[in-house]
Amino acid sequence: MYSYEECGLMFDEIADSMPFELYRELSGGLRLVERAKIHPKAVANDLYILGEYHRSNIGKYIVFYYGSIIRVYGHLPKDRFCEMLRRILSHELRHHNEYLAGCDDLNLYDDKRIKDYLIRKGVK
């Protein structure tokens, strides 16, 4: 398992390796919080939110949930764990950039994945 501090350092390294342009207008930056967050549509508390893109009166920012990430990916070797962190960051940055472009494709994709999850769980 990776500590909160180790995870934060990995996120920093990954974020620094990505093109600066992806962060335009992300005035609130990136935040790693310690808690886990269960998705509101989780059937048996088995669907975690790993990251979220937020827009508010204090700006646009991304939150990563360390507790959720560790529960889902904490067992992976470091190279795979870092790859998952990169995917989470890329996903949330895509939400941000699609918002700036007036596009909603990734939200539609996320909604479809939730619908598929509910079907697998037998929820209509």
Image (cartoon, grey):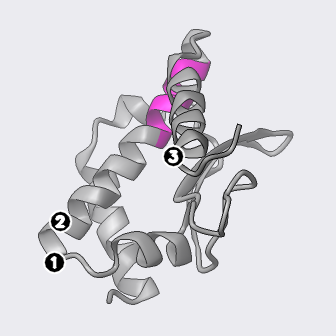
| Residue 51 lies in quadrant | bottom right
Given the image, on which type of amino acid does mark 1 rest?
Pro
Gap between marks 1 and 3 measured at Cα: 28 Å
Residue 95 relative to residue 80: left or right = right
Badge 2 local density, few (<14 within 10 Å), some, or many (20+)?
few
Residue under pointer 3: 120
Q: Amino acid at mark 2?
A: Arg
- Report the residue at 46% width, 37% height from top: 93
Please state which of the two labelled residues, at mark 3 or mark 2, is closer to the viewer.
Answer: 3
Residue drawn at 38 percent across, 29 percent down: 21
The amino acid sitting under disc 3 is Arg
Report, in whole angstroms, how far the alpha carbon at label 1 lies from the one at label 2: 6 Å
Q: Residues within 10 Å of mark 3 (few under 14, many from 20)?
A: few
Residue segment shown in magenta: 92-99
Mark 3 or mark 2: which comes first in sequence? Answer: 2
Give the left or right position of residue 89, taking residue 120 as reference: left
Asked whether the residues under the numbered discs 3 and 2 touch, taking CB atoms below 8 Å apart as contact, a structural biologist would say: no
Looking at the image, residue 97 lies above or below residue 27: above
Q: Position of residue 77 (x, y in %)?
A: 16, 77
Label 2 belongs to which residue? 80
Nearest to the eye among marks 1 and 3: give it.
3
Identify the image quadrant of residue 22: top left
Task: Indicate whether residue 34 is drawn in magenta.
Answer: no
- Whether residue 96 appears in magenta in the rendering, the answer is yes
- Which mark, residue 77? 1
Q: Are marks 1 and 2 in contact (CB under 8 Å)?
A: yes
